[in-house]
Amino acid sequence: MMQVVDTIEQVRAARWADSAATWGLVPTMGYLHEGHLSLVAASTAENDFTAVTIYVNPTQFAPDEDLNTYPRDMARDLALLAAAGVDWVFTPTDALMYPVGFQTEVRISEVTQMLEGASRPTHLHGVATVVTKLLNIVQPTRAYFGQKDAQQTVVVKRLVADLNINTEIVICPIVREADGLALSSRNVYLSAAQRRAAVVLSQSIATIADEIEAGARDGEALRQQLAALIAAEPLAQLDYVSIANPLTLHEWTTIEMEKGVLVSVAVFFGRTRLIDNRLL
């Protein structure tokens, strides 16, 4: 039977009741969808126990972002997780995660500077800090993240390597709607017209990916083409496009396919900001 806990002591007692058991961790901010549940499925298949965290982390939101309105439905989330075979759900409070006197922040210097880091300067520092705390609290064998937050996956891998955290990071594929829109908790904000328009992200990325796979290598020309494809949708307001090295996130001038390429975008539809990517 799934247990719901809200103290570090409860988590640690469960985690180390059997030191030989393997644990998978799926960190989430709740309002779960099939993308989250695909991470849960991967964890339950590979570990003896699976823990999920539900925590809307305030340090990864800027003052003008949607912290207070971020969608939440704890009862629904818990029902979905119980049905998915999760063993433990950790639901910490802000007071537990950031108690009075809290002064420490995890900052990663290079791979946080571009893309999301340029558009949302405090976001990835908040992500790195909360992920480090959750990994230290749960001490899982493996932790599962989705490829949709591509830069986040690079950041998490970097912090685990740099800080010698004894957890394997597993990256799982993007889960999409039938028309290609990447699943996101923020999709609920979209109007009907915006929802129809939002497929421009996956469609534009697919066009550029096809060109790269056909031999196109000029990074700047491809970025310009990708931006133009998105700009052709009247409801889309471009934040950024990127054709980058997937490890360093530096923009390719001339793509070196043996090192891979990450095609990524961030686009506003009204006040709703969506991201998408494809890894080649």
Image (cartoon, helix red, strand yellow):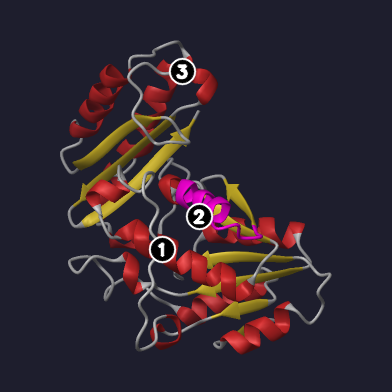
Which amino acid does the dot numbered 1 rest on? Val
* Residue name at image x 43 percent, y 66 percent: 129
Q: Is residue 265 left or right of residue 2?
A: left
- Dividing the picture into quadrants, the one containing residue 13 is bottom right
Mark earlier in primary sequence (1, 2): 1
- SS under mark 3: loop
Which amino acid does the dot numbered 2 rest on? Leu
* Residue name at image x 43 percent, y 36 percent: 248
Query: In this figure, which residue is indicated by the disc labeled 2?
Result: 159
Task: Give the magenta range.
Answer: 153-167
Mark earlier in primary sequence (1, 3): 1
Estimate the spatial distance between the alpha carbons at disc 1 and disc 3, rounded to whole Å. Answer: 32 Å
**Mark 1 neighbour density, 10 Å: few (under 14) some (14–19) many (20 or more):** some
> Where's the N terminus, which quadrant?
bottom right
Q: Is residue 66 left or right of residue 77?
A: left
Mark earlier in primary sequence (3, 2): 2
- SS under mark 1: loop
**Mark 2 neighbour density, 10 Å: few (under 14) some (14–19) many (20 or more):** some
Would residue 193 be visible to someone looking at this image? Answer: no
Q: Position of residue 272 (x, y in %)?
A: 24, 56
The residue lying toward the viewer, choosing from 170 and 235, is 170
Q: Is residue 14 left or right of residue 76?
A: right
Query: In this figure, which residue is indicated by the disc labeled 3?
Result: 256
